[in-house]
Image (tube, rainbow, N blue to C red):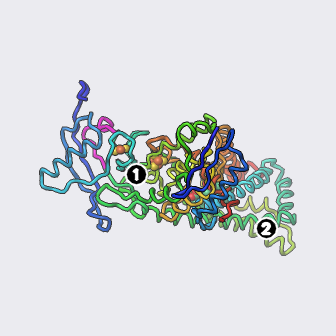
Amino acid sequence: MSGSGEKTLNLTLKVWRQKNAKAAGNLETHQLSGISTDMSFLEMFDVLNEKLITDGKEPIAFDHDCREGICGMCSMYINGRPHGPKQGVTTCQLHMRSFNDGETIVVEPWRSAAFPVVKDLAVDRSAFDRIISSGGFVSVNTGNAKDANNILIPKDDADDAFNAAACIGCGACVAACKNGSAMLFVSAKVSQLALLPQGKVEAKGRVLNMVGQMDEEGFGACTNTGACEAECPKGISLENIARMNREYLSSSLTYVKK
Amino acid sequence: MFWTFLSVGQKTYSLLFVKSLVNPHLHAYICSEYYRQKILFMSNEKFSKSSIGKKVIMGLTGLFLISFLVIHVTLNSMIFANDGGVLFNQGADFMSHNPIIRILEIGLFVGLLAHIFMALKLTLDNNKARPIKYAVTKGNANSKWYSRSMGVLGSLLLIFLVVHLAHFWVPTKVAVFSHTEHDTFASMREVFKEWYNVAIYMLGVIALGYHLLHGFQSAFQTLGLNHKKYTPMIKFIGSAFSVIVTILFAAMPIVMHLGIIK
Ligand code: HEM
Ligand code: SF4
Ligand code: FES
């Protein structure tokens, strides 16, 4: 899209470089000129990487896949905020028109004990996968689409479950939280199932297991600052955290392991 | 209508055709059967060791401390009667001698200690969750500064509480145990004569105000009490409570210092 409104920017980029998980990293400065305001933030990184390769230097490692806001891979902490200055978008959906000519942009990886840096801006988010495998599923066959539709579910519950299911597992909530807490992510994954009859069967054990795994991975606790909700690209609500707390409380009080 | 339970893992456990909607008895049976077949959930984490459990203790003790504040601020407001402390001293006397209040006082200290202990534990754990800090953060873009400063505000409160107890609680205790009269109103006048004491109380009370501004509604969220209908009300009451308590407590040293209340 090269519309008539296209402008170009000159930018100073400070990017975190780190060889591997063990190495110490540092911020590296790069100058970029002629960056189109129509580019996405990741396209700007492509330009920078091409330049680095041409110069015979190591390109910057960063995660990305879909580039349309659905896979959750594009983790970048841009100028002090996950996914940059705009609300409700991932890094791949962020455009250079959100920045000013001559601006300095600092790009860091997600910072969390549970998300070790693999290289440069790429972090290992398999802690989320382990939380999901500890309980974020339904083990009974729920039948085909027709069978599922035979279970009447109130529209409000269906909507709430659907909204919770919109979580793409990007980890921006962890990156934004001063405690590196994963409560918003885990609560979305607990809620999407707890709200539906098929998920209620295993609800008690699920929340205990998922919270247990969350703690084991080294994520922090919740102080209810609301930073996660404000930075979540999918608008996952804090109501999910309250729901998870309720589920956790009642399960802790009543769950008996067979 | 049919709902088919087919398989758990690789094996087929129950194949049911349930007429109409899920039959609750069958449903319960299938659940328990399922749990017996496959011990999936092996969580043995202790509640008080879990992140949510610790927060629940934080929230409950916090709310308990708030309930004390309600009484404390009400009683102290008796000085505004401006009757030379007669009404206020009657209240203070009742509080320091009534056996039920004495027992509640022990509960108050236990609650406060639990709150402080958990605060310390949580703050240390939370710091460990981000061992390498960001070079640049814009916290104000996504949250309120005081919500991110509960530990600092709480620590200020703790320092203030030590001074505060030394000013009023210790002399009262000494008097009760030595069976002498203690004029709390007179000691207030004494303490607030000094401008630096007034300054310390202002700092303490403002720290309390911000701690409550976040803490009041946060405690409800922690306990899972979030509801579209009631949460706005809880937030409003929390803010109003914090502001009113701050103003009332802040006014006391000032009016005493200026001699408006004698
Ligand atoms: C004296 C020392 C105190 C310290 C060190 C302290 C510390 C803290 C900290 C660190 C938190 C946040 C915990 C978290 O969410 O991670 C907190 C929460 C809270 N505090 Fe305090 N506090 C103190 C006194 C008080 C007092 C006197 C009150 C009430 C009168 C109070 C009421 C609350 C409430 C209601 C919460 C919210 C609990 C929640 O979010 O679930 N605190 N406190
Ligand atoms: S809750 Fe939001 S911010 Fe957190 S992982 Fe899911 S989509 Fe990302
Ligand atoms: S690359 Fe898939 S969400 Fe950004």
Q: Residues within 10 Å of mark 1 (few under 14, many from 20)?
A: some
Q: Residue furthest top?
A: A4
**Residue A214 in the image: x percent, y percent?**
51, 60
Q: Which residues are magenta?
A: A94-106
- What residue do we see at 70% from left, 48% from top? B248
- Circle 2 residue: B172
- Circle 1 residue: B137
Up-down relation of residue B122 to residue B140 (above or below)? below
Specify the amino acid type for callout 2.
Thr
Specify the amino acid type for callout 1.
Thr
Foreground of the two, A39 or B82: A39
Q: Is residue B194 visible?
A: no
Q: Is residue B94 visible?
A: yes
Query: Which chain is disc 2 placed on?
Result: B
Image quadrant in which the C terminus of chain A is located: bottom right
Residue A11 part of the magenta segment: no
Element at badge 2? helix
- What residue do we see at 62% from left, 58% from top? B34
Disc 2 residue: CB within 8 Å of ligand 1: no
